[in-house]
Each structure stands twice: as C-alpha cells, then as structure tokens.
C-alpha cells in the first residue's frame, strides 16, 4: 500500500489520511458523510510523505455534475506546497450541494462531501491561487462600490421632501397671512408616494423626481 501523502481534518471530524479513491497516482479523493456538516477543512502534508518541490497540491471541492454535464464540478479552493505545508479552506455553500447530490465524483460521492487533492506543477497551482485571489478581491471591490453608491439617509430625506413639495405646491392657498395646504392634498400625496414605493422601491435612489 502506498504511503499516505496528506492529512485532512474537517471541522468536527478526526484526521483522515487514507483516500476514499485514488483515480491516479497523483489524484486523491476523500469522501465525508453529510451526517455532521462542516464548512472548513484543514489539509496538510504528512511528515513522512515523499515530496517533490516541483509539484504542489491543488485542493478541490467536488460536486455532482450540473444538468447537461457528465463530469462532476471541481471548485478550486487553494493549494499547499513548498513553504506552505498546510492550510485551512472554507468550503462555502457548495458543500451543501455536494452532500445533497447523487453520484458525485465518479462514485465517491453518494451524498458525501468530496474533497479532491491533486499533485500538479507548482507553477500551475501558484497561478490558480493568484487567479482565485484576484477574483476574491474583485468581488470585495464590487461590493464596496455598491455600498458606496447607496444614497445617505440625509439625501433620501431630501428627496422625499422634494417629492412632497412638488406635489403639494399646486394645492397651496392662503388663510389671511398664512400659506396653507389642505390635509386631503397631503393624504393624496402620501397615498401616491406609498404606492410608488411599493411598485418601485428604488426610485428614490435614482433621484428621478
């Protein structure tokens, strides 16, 4: 029996060193039953494992094929290698899909969460890690931009007042020296304003008034 290369430690589970399947000498599958869900997993090289500094281990979450696909999906989580013998990976919501699927990774699934570890050229794994980091940074930047584009409470209040003023200006009259607006006009504005908020909640953010 080949010497185990990796240890996998899902949150709440004991360490696993024996793959469930070994599709090739450089590819290993580890299936975990969904009875105790977990969202993070640590992967590390075992102390006595033979090492080649020209290669690194790419870590994947393997989920059942999407409709119309034959092969399972491989979501790249990251890698370990020279100078980084271990790492903790967050599986995310895709882990639930893995557990809820059927056949999964070539028969290793069966409703399990399946982690794949693949020995690949170190340069290729490093490039994948860089790409993954870039995608994560881009997603964070987009979320920040969307947050910054949201109008402040003061701006929203000003737009509500502007909307009310434009509507009620045509109903104003005078009572002696005082300019007044009939209560029914205010009620009519509120009815229309509330109706528009219900049908188009974002209209205040667009400042179309």
Image (cartoon, helix red, strand yellow):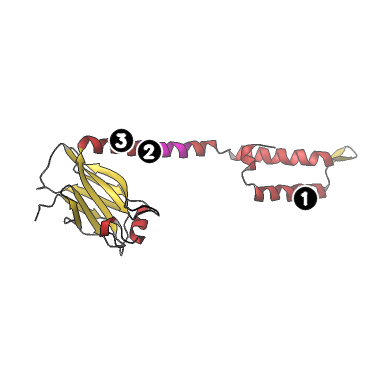
In which quadrant will I find the C terminus? Answer: top right
- In the image, what residue occupies the spot 26% across and 55% down? 10
Secondary structure beneath disc 1?
helix
Residue 182, percent across and down? 84, 46
Tell me the number on the disc at residue 130. 3
In terms of depth relative to the viewer, which is nearer, 208 or 124?
124
Instruction: Place residue 80 in its image quadrant.
Output: top left
In terms of depth relative to the viewer, which is nearer, 36 or 187?
36
- In the image, what residue occupies the spot 20% across and 37% down? 122
Circle 1 Cα neighbour tier, 10 Å, few/some/many (<14 / 14–19 / ≥20):
few
Tell me the number on the disc at residue 135. 2
Secondary structure beneath disc 3?
helix
Q: Which residue is mark 1?
A: 187
Q: Is residue 81 visible?
A: no
Secondary structure beneath disc 2?
helix
Main secondary structure type of the part rendered in magenta: helix
Residue 87, percent across and down? 24, 45
Magenta segment range? 134-144
- Image position of 198 with respect to 83: above or below: below
- Image position of 35 with respect to 150: above or below: below
Instruction: Say which label, 2 or 3, has the lower sequence index.
Output: 3
């Amino acid at each position: 029996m080949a010497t185990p290369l990796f240890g996998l430690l899902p949150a709440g589970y004991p360490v696993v060193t024996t793959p469930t399947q070994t599709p090739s000498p450089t590819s290993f599958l580890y299936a975990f039953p969904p009875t105790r869900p977990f969202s993070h997993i640590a992967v590390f090289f075992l102390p006595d494992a033979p090492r080649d500094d020209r290669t690194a281990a790419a870590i994947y979450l393997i989920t059942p094929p999407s409709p119309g696909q034959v092969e399972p999906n491989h979501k790249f989580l990251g890698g370990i290698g020279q100078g980084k013998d271990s790492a903790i990976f967050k599986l995310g919501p895709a882990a639930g899909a893995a557990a809820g699927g059927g056949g999964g990774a070539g028969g290793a699934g069966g409703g399990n969460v399946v982690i794949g570890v693949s020995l690949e050229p170190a340069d290729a794994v490093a490039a994948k890690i860089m790409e993954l980091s870039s995608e994560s940074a881009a997603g964070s930047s987009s979320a920040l931009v969307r947050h910054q584009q949201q109008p402040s409470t003061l701006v929203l209040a000003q737009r509500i007042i502007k909307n009310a003023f434009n509507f009620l200006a045509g109903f104003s009259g005078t009572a002696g020296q005082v300019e007044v607006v009939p209560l029914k006009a205010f009620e009519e504005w509120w009815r229309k304003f509330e109706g528009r908020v219900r049908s188009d909640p974002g209209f205040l953010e667009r400042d179309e008034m």
